[in-house]
Amino acid sequence: MKGEERVIYLDNNATTRTAPEAVAAMLPYFSEYYGNASSIHKFGGRLAKVVEEGRAKVAAFLGADPSEIIFTSCGTEGDNAAILSALDVCPVRRRKIVISTVEHPAILNLGKDLERRGYTVVKIPVDSLGRLDMDRAREMIDEQTAVVSVMWANNETGNLYPVEALAELAHRAGALFHTDAVQAAGKIPFKLRDMNIDMLSVSGHKFHAPKGIGALYVRRGVRFRPFVVGGHQERGRRAGTENVPYIVGMGVAAELAMANFETENNYVRKLRDDLHNRLIAAIPSVRVNGDVEHRLPNTTNLSFEYIEGESILMHMDIHGICASSGSACTTGSLEPSHVMRAMGVPYTAAHGAIRFSFSRYNTQEDVDTVVEVLPGIIEKIRAISPYWADFVAKR
Amino acid sequence: MWDYNNKVMDYFLNPRNVGEIADADAEAEVGNMTCGDALRIFLKIDEKTHKILDAKFKTFGCASAIASSSILTEIVIGMTVEEAARVTNRDIVDRLGELPEEKMHCSVMGMEALQAALGEYAKKHGLTLPEVKNDDPDDHEGRIVCKCFGVTDAKIRKVVRLNHLTTVAQVTEYTKAGGACGACLDQIQQILDEMNNTVHAPAEVEKPQTVDFDALSPVKKALKVQEVIDKEIKPALERDGGSIELIDLDGDVVKVSLRGVCATCPNSKLTLRKLVQGKLHEFLSDRLVVEEA
């Protein structure tokens, strides 16, 4: 990698740049204050205070009490811990889990695994805009249900889901409600203390903390059984030596996210909308994937019909533009993304779906470059596509 | 991100021979939108010498599909149809230098499109070409193995033979078969087993001695079952990262536990019934019933 090459990073739903402020704050905790926060001596023991400061910042960021925050290694761990705990603490023997068809693999594959262990997993379907079928949700969430887990925001489309209404349905059935808020945290404001969510997982690296740290919120009063068992850390709720530098990093990232929440989100939304509108105007046959009325301010997912996503990404890569695709080819999988298929996006468009996701580090220049470069790329690839030729001939 | 070599990148970014030939003497299309890639090939052929004068293509697909299609046109221009009929996906890969294993199906798509076009031409001119069926290219021979991608056993056999494939994972990389729902993975293994048996047929496989199983004592029975599992079943499962342990023999009920990838494989029931029970019946007794412990 050449450091001096200009990178236009529009893949912030995959991961984000760690905030330089977070990195600076973390550094002393590697080689200078490297003690173990659980030690009895001062050198290590005083780091317990640093851990608690980090916890307080993350709690403030989520609008929760510090005692409700458990540090984890990532979003996936939070998801696993929450669902398995919910199944474990379920007072009567309920063996049903309700999720959605568009969940992240962290939930989907856990669901598959639980099915093999004899649990019933049902998935709430979505419509062509990726909106949840709430009538089906009402039917599915019943007295057999132990836990309902639906993501707050979808990673591919940015669609937002009605988590409070779902939590209400879960509670009426006597079930717990968990949400994977990995994409929502830092992008939409919320205060968990004013909400009815029982458990929520977040991942640091999606909001400018480093990779390898996450948090699980467990509302006070909700019973919890640890997923990682061992030492007494995190008040017995998550064993493993406290990751002091990363906790510091996530604390700083949470603080930064809160400090200028509104300004930054308006800024990001403006850039996103500008790119979205100008691309649709400049390129024919673009399909918008997702619910533009109810989605994250930083995400747009556009299908350039009759061509395939990997070729688009690779052409963009030459210009230093980073985005991602729901196409099969990019991942080595042979099928387009499960989200596109769940939405019933036609195959003419599913393979050519490109996700652009912004952060506060993006600039107007980034948008201008993409708008300048992409129409030519699409035209070039379409000139090779037999289906584009057919489409043009029919028109 | 894929690690494509410079040649693949060159043919992807600057593809040669893109287009259509309005008065083509042969053309064919393979793949479709659902599968994620498709290739339409056009050939201009001298009717007297049967020499390919020009070739053009249009491709829907990823970088390696575009590069494979483009280089294929370069390979065949100047060849007689007979020479072109011998072109395989290996030639495409060799000319490109290399392709990632997961992208081998792109080269296979090129070979298929070429052979379909040549088949059409051969039919029109009453020619017989090696490797090419004189049939209507739409009339796919063989039975469908992979329903998700419409891959037939005939195609799997052909690609296995041409590329010396030995594992199910390779078959998926080269043909896509089994790459979606995975329901046909066992069938692909069977095809591979059959093909390997025919290839190695002359070498007599050492088999456990056939015995009058029912006359044995329970301990001897258990030892025999263990022997068949170790010699005949375990190696097949271990090739795919799985394994099996004999837990107990209770009368005629053989209790086993599947390990490794087999333990979480959705097809494990099929494995138990077809492979394990089949082998035990073959070598010991038809009365044995296999159950997962």
Image: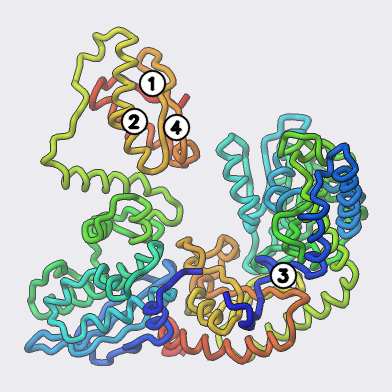
Residue B276 is marked as: 2
Q: Amino acid at mark 1?
A: Val
Q: CA distance from mark 3 to mark 2?
A: 52 Å
Instruction: Left or right? Give the position of B106 relative to A180.
Output: left
Q: Residue at x 42, y 27 (%)?
A: B245
Pointer 2 local density, CA inside 10 Å: few below 14, some 14–19, many at least 20: many
Q: Amino acid at mark 4?
A: Leu
Residue tagged 4 = B258
Residue B142 showing in the rendered view: no
Local secondary structure at mark 4: strand
Q: Which mark is residue A17?
A: 3
Between the residue at mark 1 and the residue at mark 4, the CA separation in whole angstroms equals 13 Å
Between A240 and A148, the residue placed more toward the observer is A240
Q: Which residue is rendered at x = 42% and y = 66% of the image?
A: B35
* Residue type at numbered disc 3: Arg
Q: CA distance from mark 4 to mark 2?
A: 11 Å
Task: Identify which residue, A351 or A94, lies in the foreground.
Answer: A351
The residue lying toward the viewer, choosing from A155 and A350, is A155
- Residue A114 lies, with reference to residue A244, above or below; the image says above
Circle 4 Cα neighbour tier, 10 Å, few/some/many (<14 / 14–19 / ≥20): many
